[in-house]
Amino acid sequence: MTDTSTNENTHGLPWAGLLALAVAGFVTVLTETVPAGLLPQISNGLDVSQATAGQLVTVYAAGSMLAAIPLTALTRRWPRRPVLLVTILSVVAANAATAASPWFALTFTGRLIAGLGAGLQWAMIAGYAMRMVPEASKGRALAISMGGVPVALAVGVPVGTALGTSIGWRSTFAVMAVLGLIVTAWARAALPPSAAEAAHERVPVKRVLMQPGIAILMLTAFAFEVGHMNMYTYIASFLSSSGLQDRVDVVLLVFGIASITGLWLTGMLIDRHLRAVVLTTFAAFTAAMALLATLGSSPVTTFIAIAVWGTALGAAPTMLQAASARTAGSAMEIAQSMLVTMLNAGMAAGPLLGGALYAAQGTSPLPWTSLAVFAAVLALATATGRTAFPASTTTSDTPANSPAPQEQHADALTAPTRTSR
């Protein structure tokens, strides 16, 4: 894939474009999470049960998981900016349909379409951000472009709930649709054009999976998400053991602030210290779960563990995407689509595991289970992950059995040879 932008910008980061990607991600995650706080209003408005209304969240995540790889493979031959804009518009359309639809079936269909677009969008954002900057700034650019995710996760449900209460749930989705249109115009103006992959650059999906380190990275990503969601899904119930069941909002606020801090720290360190960030993050997850498992009855310890956990979560998506892009080279979008699929699969499997444990023995086994998962992830990354998690995001430490730097970054070296819209 070639880039028609000025990749070798040495005068600073392309903030307008990177922030446009960040806000696009913010709107996309907000669209996914807001319905969780508005289920009673949505169920009443569409005359369905709350359990049925909850499927609006499920279908969005399912669409992202199922569509990421095939849609990324299908659209590789098309100019990237128009494809990215279409993914944002799919979210706009879903929010507009939700705001206006009198029928659950129409709303459900709109959410499915938005989920398909979201899966493709997440596969594209990392590559787009990293192609906009010089080699030494790729990790930082990725961290900035992903900044909307922890913000949306931290404020999505509470803000959506507050808006739904004050202006109505339909108006809330209408506001998000308008915000999406603004972001679409912003992205069209701020993002440089990026051409489609040339036919000779399109690495088959199966061969991408066989590249050294990719399978380990995908297994690690799935296990990380299982460990996180196993515990996070039932955090409100778990907090009763420390007497914080009435302070869930405060706990989640601490978690959200810590996540944003973790993302900021990752952006500062990831270019030169990718592997160190990975191992430190997985160690932090493990430590947080150990604290919750052994001392979770203490409110002070719980808050400390939540802060450590949130900081690690803020780092995790960006470091996994950076490692995926670094390992896959010119096939980064396919690798990103695999990563999106594995993360979404973990997001589905984690609550199922936690639900089974909760139904059998309550919340007490949840942190122990997540501790075991994260300890295994840390051991795997430490023992076998040097190819999946190299020392930095630069090409100086390219493993001997990986594609040569010229192949990995051909898009940065052949910049304005083709045009795109």
Image (cartoon, helix red, strand yellow):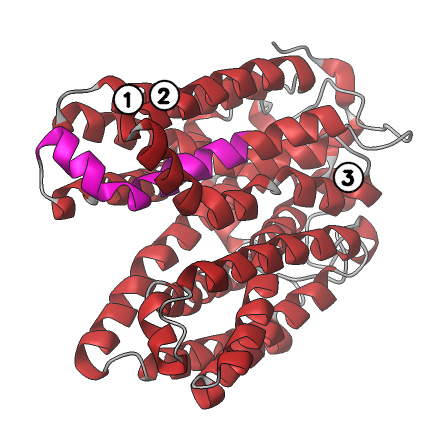
Query: Which one is in front in this view, the residue at disc 2 or the one at disc 3?
Result: 2
Q: Whole-Å distance between the Cαs marked 2 and 3?
A: 46 Å
Q: Position of residue 92 (x, y in %)?
A: 40, 21
Residue for point 23% across, 39% down: 56
Q: Quadrant of the C terminus?
A: top right
Please provide the residue range marked out in magenta. Answer: 24-47
The quadrant where residue 42 appears: top left
Q: Quadrant of the N terminus?
A: top right
Residue located beneath label 2 in the image: 174
Q: Position of residue 283 (x, y in %)?
A: 61, 76
Mark 1 residue type: Ala
Residue located beneath label 1 in the image: 99
Mark 3 residue type: Gln
Whether residue 294 can be seen here: yes
Whether residue 78 can be seen here: no
The quadrant where residue 145 appears: top right
Depth check: give the residue in front, 29 or 269. 29
Residue for point 13% across, 35% down: 44
Q: Residues within 10 Å of mark 1 (few under 14, many from 20)?
A: many
In contact (CB < 8 Å): disc 1 and disc 2: yes
Residue extending furthest right?
11
Residue located beneath label 3 in the image: 406
The magenta stretch spans residue 115:
no
The quadrant where residue 148 appears: top right
In the image, residue 267 sits, relative to residue 162, either above or below, namely below
Q: Whole-Å distance between the Cαs marked 3 and 1?
A: 49 Å
Depth check: give the residue in front, 416 or 6. 6
Mark 2 residue type: Ala
Q: Is residue 241 left or right of residue 12?
A: left
For marks 3 and 1 on the same chain, the one whose residue lies earlier in the sequence: 1
In contact (CB < 8 Å): disc 2 and disc 3: no
